[in-house]
Image: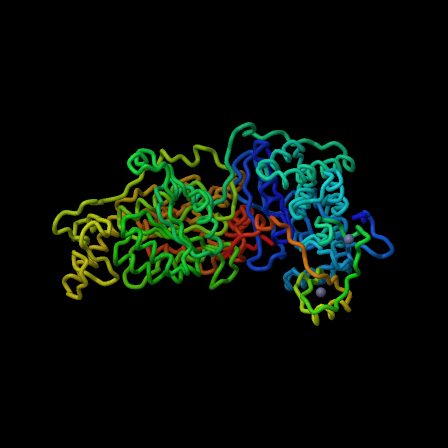
Amino acid sequence: MVDLSFIIGGPQGGGVESAGQIALKAFVVKGYNVLGTREYHSNIMGAHSYYHVRVRDGPARALRTPVDLVVAIDAESVLTHINDVREGGYLVYDLDSVETDATKIASMEPSLRSRLRRFFESINMKPTVGSAVKVLEERGVRTVGLPLKDMLKKVSETLGAPIASIAKTVNVIGLTAGLYTLGVGLEYIVKAVEAQFGRRPKILAPNVTAARVAFEFMEWNFGSMKELPDGPHRGRVRMVASGNEVVAMAKIVGGLTFETFYPITPASDEAFYIEENKYVELGELSRRLGLDRLPIVVLQTEDEISAINMAIGAAVAGARAATSTSGPGFSLMNEAISMAVEMEAPVVVTLWMRAGPSTGIATRTGQQDLLHAIFSGHGDTPKIVVASGDHVEAFYDAIKAFNWAEMFQTPVIHLLDKYLASTITVLDEWDLDVSRISINRGLRVESPPEGYKRYEVTDNGISPFAPLGTTTMVASSLEHDEYGFASEDPVDREAMVEKRLRKFETMAKSIPEEEKLSVHGDPDARVTIVSFGSTKQPIISAMEELEREGVRVKFLQLRILSPFPSKTVSEILDNSDLIIGVEANSMGQLAFLVRAHTGIEVGHLIQKFNARPFYDVEIVYGVKRVLSEGARRVVVSGGA
Amino acid sequence: MEAVIVKRSSGGLGCFNCANWLPHVHYPFAGYCTVWGEVTFEDYYCSKHSMMSVDADRFYWCASCRVRLTREEASTHWVQGHRVVRGAYVDPDVRDEIYEG
Ligand SMILES: [Zn+2]
Ligand SMILES: [Zn+2]
């Protein structure tokens, strides 16, 4: 069984991004499943950032530490990840950095600097890279010092030309040395470098040379490489994509025609991807229009208030419309969510959660906006909130979100997070199968009849939807009669509130139970994990490990959080002896919802709120602590 | 130009203390020579060498602290032995490596 983890660390903006992607591609070419995420600082270029990767022949579901390899391009990375390499693993570092003292590294967080100083003081050593290397060697880590500067010179000399991109080339040198220790041969690395820079010859040539120089260095010093056998997917054409990209693809194939955004981490990349790929083939329609393709409108607005209001306007006018944001932006959208409910506007809000409150840690992950999403908007504001567990779910959910928005003429909030946004995984063609999903635009009337009532009172609460402009009609934020005209009449008011409530019941009844929740693992297990969102794959990975140790657990994954599937959740939880919540927030927001809807207490919580994603080993640890000592609350803290 | 780049520093002079040289913002052992218009290394030397000093009223870059400095600030860093230069070199493709926020 192949199960490798590694970290590539370096200064933000200093080439770690390319190196991480090259590493992922090298393993994909080699036939393995990969999962990789980037951790980076929100506002300091040069601050420590890293790529964290897991490679398996089976599914790569979660990250973990300790890792088998840390490639530390700079001094800060060696010191930051001093506790992350396992015994027998490798550290690749820059030989010229050994003298560097933690107290002199300008970009290092002061708290980490103090922790390092205290640690090295306690063992009577200076807090330098050299000391760290010594400590690691004593712990059984194998260290590889690279003369990075000389190697870069050699690349330049071999090439007979100056280096075009110092950062990328330095990183490819470090990465190649690292991949050698894992048994990835030069041909795979070169293929991955070509896949990364193939369209840019000025960058490609020095990086291919860099890989050669680094590989030769390793062979010269450590002998010929022990080759890792090819993985089970060797030779297959597969796709690597981030969560941002997968959601963007889904929106495009899901019929999006209008997307607004105001730039915010980790949402912007989604809009950028749509912008880059916004031309949609028109097929049949093209003959009529005399065009073969049309762009999706992607609009960067002046703020989030404008972003959602424009999207609502487009939705009411009949476009498939969405906006994309994260917590702070969603706060600004709150008033408009309420208006969308009042106007029955089919708008989709893609909400990429990150670590709040406030701007908090803008580039790190968390699941703190569940209640924010559920309770967004003032007044009684029934709406759909759907949370995706992984890339594949995110793809289908993004399309379904449009269907639901139009079927039920309601705002739909699609809940995702920074971890999914920036995590890259490998996907097969059949993972994102458009034929598995149809586009349902709901009850639409393109030519409304005489006397058309936009808000006609119906049994299921759904009125026929005519796009604004197809007849004389009113859509506003005010309470209204069936035509949409403002009305404060108590009978009209009650009828409209009841209609919206009936519509909410219709949503609850129409969405199949299997789309609202999933049960993973042994359905008869007496221990139940309850969670939502991106914890899904880490939990499943943890369950696989627990099962090997004879611990039987099932996992109730909530996918639709509003309307809440109370009855099924009650049934499942009533049949459990022990309920463990797993949440990346401190308040137990899902546990709160479960209690509110079912009266059932989630008695134990495994939580992580250091703004880094859950590792599978942390969930294994948490479950064991709950089972062995009945721990009520286990807080796990992995990640640098 | 009859001058050439020599690939080792000479008599305590090198790109590292040359006013024409901008060390890379992240990897200051390499950098950009504004005279030759290409990437060179800190221990290279050429006949166009011009000794780095902090005197003109302009902005400077401290490679030790990774911070941009005014002339007064630069003098303080300079006397403390920090690596003060005229500016830092950023790769032309740096945008690939950073994310919008
Ligand atoms: Zn020179
Ligand atoms: Zn300084």
Q: Residue furthest top?
A: A235
Q: Please tell me which residue is depicted at 58% across the width and 32% down the height of the picture.
A: A29
Q: Quadrant of the C terminus of chain A?
A: bottom right
Q: In terms of depth relative to the viewer, which is nearer, A186 or A621?
A: A186
Above-or-below relation of A373 to A527 = below
Q: Quadrant of residue A523?
A: top left
User: Residue A405's x, y, as percent?
Assistant: 30, 48
User: Residue A218's x, y, as percent?
Assistant: 74, 37
In-image side of A209 versus A637 (left or right): right
Q: How is the image coloured?
A: rainbow
In-image side of A131 versus A388 (left or right): right
Query: In this view of the protein, can residue A585 be seen by the observer?
Result: yes
User: Residue B35's x, y, as percent?
Assistant: 73, 53
In-image side of A350 versus B35 (left or right): left
Question: How many numbered marks, from 0 up?
Answer: 0
Q: Residue furthest left?
A: A450
Above-or-below relation of A617 to A337 = above
User: Residue A15's x, y, as percent?
Assistant: 63, 48
Q: Quadrant of the N terminus of chain A?
A: top right
Q: In terms of depth relative to the viewer, which is nearer, A519 or A609?
A: A609
Q: Quadrant of residue A483?
A: bottom left
Query: In this view of the protein, can residue A526 be seen by the observer?
Result: no
Q: Residue furthest front?
A: B1
In-image side of A594 versus A163 (left or right): left
Q: Residue furthest right?
A: B11
Q: In terms of depth relative to the viewer, which is nearer, A456 or A3?
A: A456
